[in-house]
Image (cartoon, rainbow, N blue to C red):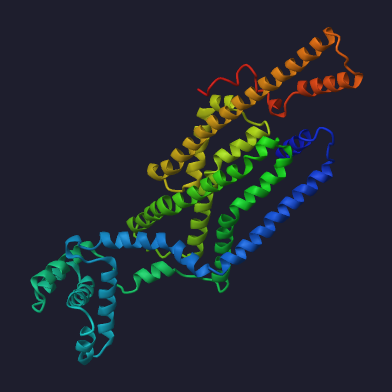
């Protein structure tokens, strides 16, 4: 409510001749909210038609985490990838369900290397269920295997990869325990994608509500500010999706394995976590835009931000610790460092804005003094000055002497606005 009151005052100061009633401000606010809701409805419907592609895109980080951990449990020198190991396990399971007379027909469809891996996978499945003291004698008794196959089998027994077929697809597609859960998740995914898609328009509607309180030269900077704000939001979302989210998922996957817990995540929990995580990162990267708005309405200035820089960094660290639920310092720094840099950029932007305002005030003051000197010279030389011209000149002088709306903050001191932030 306090912020709305400041915005309403800002809109009134831009129109000195007329002051809008409070209800008219609320009507403008209602129009802004309606436009935002309608825009989000349209973008959500559009994104819902691409729900399959969006779901596949959001599943990509978790598939990468599975591939990394699967590769870590496979011998590196054997050229055995996670995908090839899945093929070998599937082939082994297929052979177990086929009559022995058809084994040759099935194996003939595979390459020589794949046939070798299927044989190793079948032997590994049998070895893994034996007691540990009987595993090596069993491997030694497999006379049909080559030495390279036995060596690979021994390494698999040591590394203990999963021998069940379909573990990748099970981890990738997860499970839904509610009949309506897939549909609701599709709607949630479409809504979050719609927010990203409509973000420039949402910013424009918000600034359009504040624009009546801006000067003409400030209104010209709205569209560059929109592009800058959307760029920051997009950078935050991409940074979270490409860098931070895989790191966080890998931490939780490893933590679950270390405690002997099977990582069978539900699709609902994963999507909610991933969507909120990336969206929060995008909003955190909007820090310079938020600061710019607060500076314009007089709630902040560069001096206050410079003096409280240490407190702001502590607040950023606390916020990052809440947003990133992993206790490792690396993931925490992935959010703290960008936000600290953006906060420093915000201080410099506020300083440049204050210096620009000071120059404009000095220019207006010089023009006012020049007009007064011109009137005095004309009067002393006996020039004919009409009464209406004198009244107009006095009105202009009084208007120029009125305090500018940007000086409403107590921290805007004309003597200090030229000093750079410390």
**Is residue 102 at all visible to an observer of this figure?**
yes
Residue at x-position 50% and y-position 39%: 318
- Residue nearest the observer in this picture, 54 or 398: 398
Residue at x-position 35% and y-position 70%: 167
Q: Quadrant of the N terminus?
A: top right
Q: Quadrant of residue 358?
A: top right
Above or below, 107 against 339 in this view is below
- Residue nearest the observer in this picture, 304 or 315: 304
Residue at x-position 65% and y-position 62%: 41
**Image x and y of residue 340, in percent:** 48, 36
Question: Would you say 234 lies left or right of 145 here?
Answer: right
**Image x and y of residue 106, in percent:** 24, 86
Q: Quadrant of residue 97?
A: bottom left
Question: Which residue reaches farthest right?
Answer: 387
Residue at x-position 84% and y-position 36%: 18
- Residue nearest the observer in this picture, 280 or 350: 350
**Image x and y of residue 220, in percent:** 65, 40
Question: Which residue reaches farthest bottom?
Answer: 101
Q: Quadrant of residue 328?
A: top left
């Amino acid at each position: 409510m306090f912020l709305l009151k400041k915005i309403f005052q800002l809109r009134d100061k831009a129109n000195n001749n007329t002051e809008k009633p409070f209800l008219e401000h609320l009507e403008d606010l209602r129009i802004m909210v309606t436009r935002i809701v309608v825009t989000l409805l349209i973008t959500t419907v559009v994104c819902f038609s691409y729900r399959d592609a969006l779901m596949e895109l959001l599943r990509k980080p978790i598939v990468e985490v599975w591939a990394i951990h699967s590769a870590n449990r496979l011998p590196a020198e054997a050229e055995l990838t996670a995908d090839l190991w899945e093929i070998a396990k599937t082939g082994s399971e297929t052979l177990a369900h086929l009559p022995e007379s058809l084994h040759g027909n099935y194996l003939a469809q595979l390459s020589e290397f794949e046939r070798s891996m299927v044989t190793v996978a079948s032997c590994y499945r049998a070895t893994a269920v034996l007691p540990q003291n009987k595993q090596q004698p069993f491997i030694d008794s497999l006379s049909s295997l080559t030495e390279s196959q036995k060596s690979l089998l021994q390494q698999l027994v040591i590394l203990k990869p999963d021998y069940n077929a379909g573990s990748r697809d099970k981890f990738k597609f997860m499970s839904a325990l509610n009949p309506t859960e897939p549909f609701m998740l599709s709607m949630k995914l479409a809504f979050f994608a719609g927010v990203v898609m409509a973000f420039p328009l949402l910013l424009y509607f918000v600034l359009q509500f504040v624009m009546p309180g801006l000067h003409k030269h400030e209104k010209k900077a709205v569209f560059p500010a929109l592009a800058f704000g959307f760029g920051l939001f997009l950078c935050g979302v991409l940074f979270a999706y490409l860098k931070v989210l895989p790191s966080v998922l890998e931490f939780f996957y490893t933590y679950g394995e270390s405690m002997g817990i099977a990582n069978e995540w539900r699709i609902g929990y994963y999507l909610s976590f991933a969507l909120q995580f990336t969206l929060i990162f995008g909003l955190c990267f909007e820090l310079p835009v938020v600061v710019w708005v607060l500076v314009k309405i007089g709630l902040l200035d560069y001096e206050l931000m410079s003096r409280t820089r240490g407190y702001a960094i502590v607040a950023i660290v606390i916020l990052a610790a809440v947003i990133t639920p992993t206790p490792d310092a690396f993931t925490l720094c992935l959010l703290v460092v960008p936000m600290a840099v953006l906060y420093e950029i915000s201080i410099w932007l506020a300083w440049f804005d204050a210096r620009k305002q000071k120059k404009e005030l000095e220019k207006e003051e010089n023009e006012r003094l020049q007009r007064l000197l011109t009137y005095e010279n004309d009067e002393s030389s006996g020039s004919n000055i009409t009464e209406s011209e004198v009244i107009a000149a006095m009105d202009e002088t009084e208007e120029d002497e009125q305090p500018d709306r940007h000086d409403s903050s107590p921290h805007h001191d004309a003597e200090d606005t030229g000093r750079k932030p410390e």
